[in-house]
Image: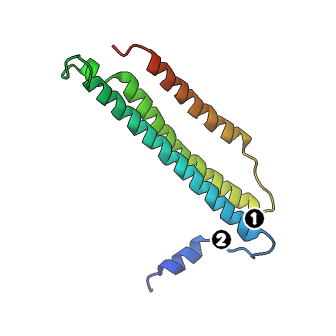
C-alpha cells in the first residue's frame, strides 16, 4: 500500500463544500477568528511570562538579601504569571472548540452566537487584571 501524500491526507481530513454564495467567505472568516483566538492566547502567555519576570527583577533590585527565597521569588508573581499562562492555554482550546463548532453549524446553514463563551473569557481576563492591580498596591514583603 503506498504511503499517503500530504495532499491525500489533507483531502481525507478536510471538509469539501460547494462554493455557492458566501460559503468560502464565511469559512475563511471562521479561520481568521480562530487565528485571533490563538493570537490572544499567545498574548496572555506573554503577559504571564512578563509578570513573572518583572516580579523577579523588581525583587532582585530591592535592598533585601538576594538569597532570601521570600523576597527573591514572591508568591504573587508566581500565581499571577501562572494564571495568565494557564488562561492562555485555555484560550487555545476555547478557540479550537469554537472553530469546529462554527464550522459544523455553518455546514447546516446555522451560525452559533457565543455570548456565554465570550462573556466567560472576558470575565476571566478581567478577574486576572483585577488581581494584577491588587497585587500592585499591596505590600510584597
> For the residue labelled by badge 1, is the local secondary structure a helix, a strand or a loop?
helix
Q: Which residue is mark 1?
A: 107
Q: Residue at x 67, y 41 (%)?
A: 117
> For the residue labelled by badge 2, is the local secondary structure a helix, a strand or a loop?
loop
- What is the residue that sits farthest to the bottom in this orientation? 2
Image location of residue 110, percent across then percent down: 80, 57
40 up-or-down from 23: above or below: above
Image location of residue 89, percent across then percent down: 49, 44
29 up-or-down from 39: above or below: below
Q: Using the image as rendered, state which of residue 45 and residue 114 is in the foreground.
A: 45
Q: Which residue is mark 2?
A: 15
Image location of residue 27, percent across then percent down: 69, 65
The quarter of the picture where residue 28 lies is bottom right
Q: Using the image as rendered, state which of residue 18 and residue 127 is in the foreground.
A: 127
Say whether marks 1 and 2 touch (CB < 8 Å). Answer: yes
**Label ID, residue 96:** none
- Cα–Cα gap, marks 1 and 2: 10 Å
Q: Residue at x 31, y 29 (%)?
A: 56
Amino acid at each position: 500500500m503506498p504511503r499517503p501524500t500530504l495532499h491525500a491526507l489533507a483531502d481525507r481530513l478536510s471538509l469539501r463544500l460547494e462554493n455557492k454564495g458566501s460559503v468560502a467567505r464565511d469559512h475563511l472568516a471562521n479561520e481568521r477568528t480562530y487565528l485571533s483566538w490563538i493570537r490572544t492566547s499567545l498574548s496572555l502567555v506573554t503577559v504571564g511570562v512578563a509578570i513573572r519576570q518583572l516580579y523577579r527583577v523588581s525583587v532582585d533590585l530591592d535592598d533585601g538579601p538576594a538569597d532570601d527565597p521570600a523576597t527573591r521569588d514572591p508568591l504573587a508573581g508566581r500565581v499571577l504569571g501562572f494564571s495568565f499562562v494557564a488562561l492562555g492555554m485555555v484560550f487555545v482550546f476555547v478557540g479550537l472548540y469554537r472553530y469546529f463548532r462554527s464550522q459544523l453549524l455553518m455546514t447546516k446553514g446555522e451560525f452559533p452566537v457565543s455570548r456565554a463563551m465570550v462573556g466567560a473569557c472576558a470575565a476571566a481576563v478581567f478577574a486576572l487584571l483585577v488581581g494584577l492591580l491588587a497585587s500592585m498596591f499591596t505590600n510584597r514583603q
